[in-house]
Amino acid sequence: MGSQRTWRVAALVGATALVAACGSSSPSSSSSVPTQSGNITAGVIAPFTGPAAQFGKLLSAPCFAATDLINKAGGILGKTISCSAIDDTGDPADAVPNVTRAIATTTNLDIAVGLESNTAATTVPLVNDAKIPIVTTNGLVAFTKNSYPYYWRLTPSDDANGAAFAVWAVQKGFKNVAVVFQNGIGSEGNLPGLTSAMPKLGGSLGLQLTIPADAASYSSEVARVINAHPDALIWSADPQTTATFMSEYKQLNNGSIPPMVTATDSLTPDFFGALKRVVGVTYVTQDVYLVGSSFSQTTAAFNTYKTALQNDSRTSAIADVLSAVGPPASAYDGINIMALAMVMAKSTVGSYYNQFVTKIISPKPGAVVVSNFADGVAALKAGKQIQYVGVIGPVVFNQYHNSAGEFAANIFNPDGSASRVGSISGTQVLGLL
Amino acid sequence: MQLIIEAIGFGIATGAVIALGAVGFSVQFGISNILNITYGALMTLSAYIGLVLINHGINAWAALAISAVAVGAVSVIYHRILLAPLVRRGTRAIAMIIVTVSAGTILQYVIVAIAGPSSQSYGEQSGQTFHFLDLTLSFGQVTIIVLTAILMLALHLLLTRTTLGKAMRATSSNRTLARSCGIATSRISDIAWFISGCLCGAAGVALAITTVSFDFSLGALFLIPMIAAAVLGGIGQPYGAMLGGMIIGISSEVAAAVSNPNYKDVVAFVILIIVLLVRPRGLFGAAWSSRRLMEG
């Protein structure tokens, strides 16, 4: 009896050791650098179904662009990288099982991209616990200070965006604004920055409403806003909710709608199309201001990014609109940074290459400034230090792995593409918080 | 006060759409005793049929009529092919609900596969508004209120003034007894499913006109308020569903006018629960049953 038990224990220990040895990552024989067999997957964690499905398209596109260019440059340490859609549906209740399953079943899921505001609070801890470096586009204020080592954000937080809305509204002469946000953790995150900044700029918030998504009617809410006589609406809602609300506004206000200031998250074909269909193209192209993080559209990095979007059949149709939007551009840069960190670390294992991320973007004396993956790999192979400065410009992560930048206001063109109509200083924005 | 009066007007408009769907749902349940959750997906189907027709240049109100008839026909086929055989085999009520949930989910995803996940619209609405007392209503809202009133009146006349209506009520009340009295209950059932399907289809297009922008989740989102309206009025009771729809529509709009709009649906459901605590069969449950028995 005792002998049998000893054998069982020994067999269990042996089996455990064998499983550990056959695991996807293992220390190499020559050093402590963990290695991994097989190609690399970048998981795009975003809504691909449901009302926010457009986010999935928007965040997949930069992944396609980045991975196309990385693979053309020979891949990462000889491995190819591909994008895999992980549908979080925009709903935390669906996101948790979907992301948990993806982590368990996706081979070599070495980068996670997206994790937008609707679901980030639930998905970030899951991905972080799996030791997968995250390039997130969420704007949640809750992550302004966080303790997740695998979390990297290259976009401004929502409260900074809210303050930027206020700056632009006042700059345009809209002193009395009504705030209408769809309920949801993402859009409501703008509110603290907005309420803090507006009085400091001499403006006032006449009415603040949060509305449920996709209701049959918003007539009563519209009546309340009309009674407040706002100069402009500070707005955040999905395309469908926006179309319903604005259509009712136009009907109940004798065909007139005040200008709208909203986030560049709405710079999507779906938002443009939904609004244009119900209130007409003139309003959409003249009175809708989309404010968000900004970057130069004349740099070599931007041209490379835009060309990659245009050359890929999966993204070519939305290349013009997409290239102007901050979060997708930051996702593109984030993937390049992670890929270069893998090359520098000589490992594609997240728990190891994660420590090299800051080394890729930090300015150093004598470092070669590179704006794409291919140049970065060449410099690293030549034994040089590098600083990646991509589409969104220099990235400076603070101790919480957050990096904000400059802001700009855009308007839609009649074809749905965007044009910049003004810029907003990041320093001014941060000073208003 | 002005806001509350306006909200009551808006609530009547919203309630009209809910009532339209709730009455169809209630008729279906009354005649076949099946809680048909596929109803929501059929409303979505109707909205998309309407979209195709409007995109081909057909007037929105004509599209509503055509879509309603089309969904009426689909409902009869759906009942005949899937639900009736399951009922004949003695499938339990809970299993029937699961079947209708499954069929609704399948239909919803078929719609997504064909039409895509993006939001759709019937286009820019007429800017015409109507002012009555302190109420301001859009042309679309007024039209839907009038349409609902006409359809409800027609249904009332059908149920109370025609032989077919009596046969429907008899079948609803006691199917076996109705059959033994010579009523072709199977045919009556088909007609009831067609009528309720038409109401479902009309509600789908009316909802798409009201919301202006919609996607594949349209019916699923509004199924719960419609079921709530039907339950509030007394499930199986068309008049109860009409009243239930109005109560839910008006209470949610008034709530949106005077409090946080996020709670507009909550207020409606609180009223539903309170009413059911006081009258477990709903507002019209017991009274209508007695009258129906007397008239039958």
Image (cartoon, coloured by chain):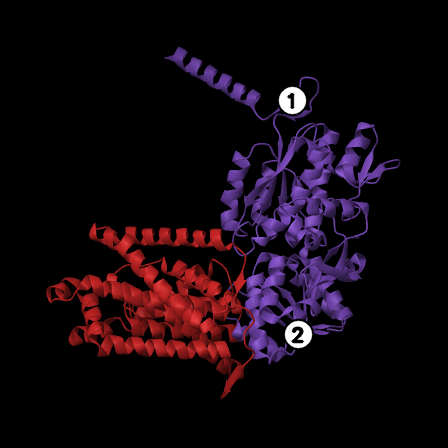
Residue that sits furthest to the front in the current view: B56
Palette colour of chain A: purple
Answer few, some or many: residues within 10 Å of disc 2's Cα (few below 14, many 20 plus, some between 14 and 19).
many
Instruction: Please tell me whether mark 2 or mark 1 is closer to you in this view.
Output: 2
Q: Position of residue A174 (x, y in %)?
A: 73, 73
Q: Position of residue B193 (x, y in %)?
A: 29, 64
Which residue, given by chain and number where applicable, does mark 1 sit on?
A27
Q: Position of residue B158 (x, y in %)?
A: 26, 76
Residue that sits furthest to the left in the current view: B180
Which residue, given by chain and number where applicable, does mark 2 sit on?
A258
**Callouts 2 and 1 in the same chain:** yes
- The quarter of the image holding the N terminus of chain A is top left
Residue B182 image-quadrant placement: bottom left
Palette colour of chain B: red
The structure residue drawn at horizontal position 54% and vertical position 81%, both measured from the top left corner, is B128
Q: Cβ–Cβ below 8 Å for labels 2 and 1? A: no
Residue that sits furthest to the top in the current view: A3
- The kind of residue tagged 1 is Pro
The structure residue drawn at horizontal position 23% and vertical position 72%, both measured from the top left corner, is B286
Q: Mark 2 — on which chain does it sit?
A: A
Horizontal side of residue B56 vs A163, given as left or right: left
Horizontal side of residue B9 vs A344, given as left or right: left
